[in-house]
């Protein structure tokens, strides 16, 4: 079993910045890619950003140019730098680890960290 622990959430004013961290209990290079997701009240969970083991990144259109995902393989950490935050970025942010085995894809999820952006 893999544990993912997010931290760094909080309350920030619009235009501000936050840096989320995700600590994994296992070597993150063992996964195909790591992802950040978010879920706002009354909405479905959505993908925010992903980063592969080869450092290829991808972002949701809504956060492109404002958020940056990165990883530190030596520390088994994944980060999400969030700038120019908007009230619509308010959500619980989750870290996830994605991999595949002979039986198919799998993922592990953290418990989430709350990000609240005030206007």
Image: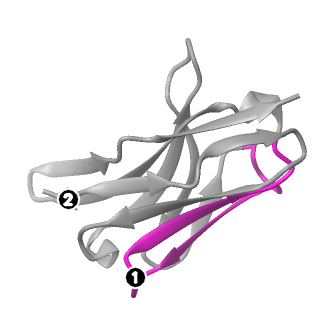
Magenta stretch? 61-85
Give yes or no for residue 1 being in the magenta stretch: no
Cα gap from disc 2 to disc 1, whole angstroms: 15 Å
Q: Could you say which is closer to the camera, residue 12 or residue 93?
A: 12
- Which residue is more in the foreground, 73 or 47? 73
Q: Is residue 118 above or below residue 115?
A: above
Query: x and y percent of residue 117 in the render?
Result: 76, 34
**SS class, disc 1:** loop
Q: Quadrant of the C terminus?
A: top right
Quick one: SS at disc 2?
Answer: loop
The quadrant holding residue 86 is: top right
- Give the percent coordinates (x, y) of residue 10: 64, 43
Q: Residues within 10 Å of mark 2 (few under 14, many from 20)?
A: some
- Tell me where residue 46 appears, x and y as whole percent: 54, 33
Furthest-bottom residue in this view: 74
For this rendering, which residue is in front, 88 or 65? 88
Identified at 40% across, 82% down, the residue is 75
Name the residue tied to disc 1: 75
Residue found at the far top of this picture: 42
Which of the numbered marks, if any, corresponds to residue 2? 2
């Amino acid at each position: 079993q893999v544990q993912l622990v997010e931290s760094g959430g909080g309350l920030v004013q619009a235009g501000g910045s936050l840096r989320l961290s995700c600590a994994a209990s296992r070597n993150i290079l063992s996964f195909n890619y790591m992802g950040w997701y978010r879920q706002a009240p009354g909405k479905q969970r959505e993908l925010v950003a992903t980063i592969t083991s080869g450092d290829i990144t991808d972002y949701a259109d809504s956060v492109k140019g404002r958020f940056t995902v990165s990883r530190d393989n030596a520390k088994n950490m994944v980060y999400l730098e969030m700038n120019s935050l908007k009230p619509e970025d308010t959500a619980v942010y989750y870290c996830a680890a994605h991999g595949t085995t002979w039986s198919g894809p799998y993922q592990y999820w953290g418990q989430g960290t709350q990000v609240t952006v005030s206007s």
